[in-house]
Amino acid sequence: MTGYAPPIRRLIKELSRFPGIGEKTATRLATFILRASDDDAKRLAESIIEVKRKIRFCSVCFNLAEGDLCEICRDTARVRNTICVVEDPNSLIAIEESGSFRGMYHVLHGVLSPLDGIGPEHLRLRELLERIANDNVEEIIIATNPSVQGESTALLITKLVGEKGVKVTRIALGVPVGGDLKYMDKMTLSKAIEFRRGM
């Protein structure tokens, strides 16, 4: 970063802290910001500050929300007795965009990862169990990613929720629509066989 004025170097350094942003991309972004109008730069800065000031976790499902409750928890048309458990808000958004689920959610904000020091106490599991006890929940759909950590988290949730007498299901895993079997990895094919269904 030699040759850049100190304010530009600081901006590049801050931008490169973002996930997936290396020094080259951070430099391109900094250059773009530098060339932007004062109004554009001001709007960008204000939107970052606004997000930090206004966005918090929903008090029910722990999705991102502007107020006490997120839009989904405020929606009275949602099915309240079914909860889909997801790792993070991005997973929730992906399911919502599919248009196939009209129940409630519970966002864990992570998965079990002992190597990273993330244990059950770091996830929103206690709050999930409280919701089951208080909200007449009939089914928990586990929608964690099909990774080692996601599977471990799903098994733990199954054990904890199973003790409460609530139905526990797992989203289907396996071959995607339009996929070619010869290009699938072993884990994907294994899950496709495991989660097969009747015709």
Image (cartoon, grey):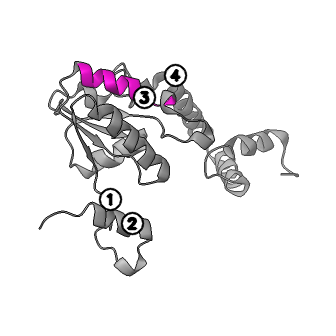
**Residue 24 shown in magenta:** no
Distance (Cα) linking label 3 and label 2:
28 Å
Which residue does the numbered mark 3 point to in the structure image?
124
Compared to residue 36, the image places residue 122 above or below, namely above
Q: Give, as a single range, the part of the protein colored magenta.
A: 122-133
Residue 3 at x, y percent in the picture: 88, 52
Q: Nearer the viewer, mark 3 or mark 4?
A: 3
Mark number displayed over residue 173: 1
**Residue on which the image places disc 2:** 188
Disc 3 or 1, which lies upstream in sequence?
3
Q: Tell which circle, 1 or 4, labels the residue nearer the N-terminal end.
A: 4
Residue 88 against residue 54 in the figure, above or below: below
Badge 3 marks a residue whose secondary structure is: loop
The span from disc 3 to disc 1 (Cα, nearest Å) is 24 Å
Dominant SS type (magenta): helix
| Marker disc for residue 53 | 4
Q: Nearer the viewer, mark 1 or mark 4?
A: 1
**Mark 1 packing: few (<14 Cα in 10 Å), some, or many (20+)?**
some
As helix, strand or loop, the secondary structure at mark 4 comes to: helix
Q: Quadrant of residue 107?
A: top left
Q: CA distance from mark 2 to mark 4?
A: 41 Å
60 relative position to 26: left or right: left
C-alpha separation, residue under disc 1 versus residue under disc 4: 38 Å
Question: Which quarter of the rendering shows the C terminus?
Answer: bottom left
| Badge 4 amino acid | Arg
Q: Secondary structure at mark 1?
A: loop
Q: Quadrant of residue 165?
A: top left
Q: Is residue 93 left or right of residue 152?
A: left
Image coords of residue 43 (percent x, y): 54, 35
Quarter holding residue 131: top left
Amino acid, disc 3: Arg
